Amino acid sequence: MKLQFLLPSLLFMASALLFVQCGESYDEAEEEVIDETEGMTDRFQEERDQMQAELKELRDEIDKRLNELAARIDAASDEAAEGLEDAYAELSDDRSELERAIDDIGDASADTWADIRAESEEMYENVSSRFTDWLESLEEEM
């Protein structure tokens, strides 16, 4: 008779102990997920801020060159101004692309970041390369 009473009591205590341990494991797992999510969010924000800063730096350099180019257009003869105006239009287009990418990055969420980052990196490389080529050709002309 004692065995019949003792066995259910032991089963009850064992299940209670198991339940408490599972609860702790669940809490620990939940805490780990929260920590990992916060870490991913921090990395996303750091990457986004860095990419935005790089694009803004290139945009500011293009703005500087656009201002210089505008002054050269004003001082140039009609024939020389034509070529400079073409260069100005191309740089203005590149600047617009940069501005759009800066806005897209600012609007990016963690879910869309991978695609926006890839597009922005490719666009940065293209614009930066064209800008460098333009600067080199400008130096050769001088």
Image: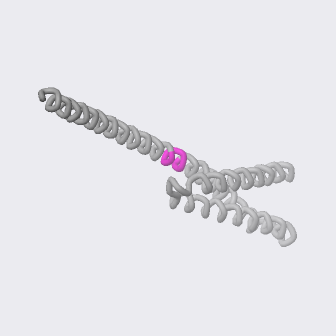
Q: Which residue is drawn at 74% across and 54% down?
A: 126
Give residue 67's position: percent from left, percent from top.
66, 61
Quadrant (top left/top right/bottom left/bottom right) for the N terminus: top left
Q: In this view, does 97 lie above or below 49?
A: below
Q: Is residue 78 above or below residue 58?
A: below
The outermost residue toward the left is 2
Q: In which quarter of the image is residue 60?
A: bottom right
Q: Quadrant of residue 25?
A: top left
Q: In this view, does 111 lie to the left or right of 119?
A: left
Q: Is residue 2 above or below residue 77?
A: above
Residues drawn in magenta: 44-49
Q: In this view, does 92 lie to the left or right of 18?
A: right
Identify which residue, 127 or 108, lies in the foreground.
Answer: 108
Q: Which residue is drawn at 25% across and 35% down?
A: 15
Main secondary structure type of the part rendered in magenta: helix
Give residue 11's position: percent from left, percent from top.
23, 33
Identify which residue, 103 or 62, lies in the foreground.
Answer: 103
Q: Is residue 64 above or below residue 25?
A: below
Give residue 61's position: percent from left, percent from top.
65, 53
Give residue 124's position: percent from left, percent from top.
68, 52
Identify which residue, 132 or 29, lies in the foreground.
Answer: 29
The outermost residue toward the bottom is 78
Residue 78 inside the magenta-drawn segment: no
Q: Give the image's coloring scheme.
A: one colour
Q: Residue at x 61, y 60 (%)?
A: 101
Identify which residue, 99 or 115, lies in the foreground.
Answer: 115
Q: Quadrant of residue 134?
A: bottom right
Q: In this view, does 123 lie to the left or right of 3?
A: right
Q: In this view, does 73 lie to the left or right of 17?
A: right
Q: Residue at x 44, y 40 (%)?
A: 36
Total marks shown come to 0
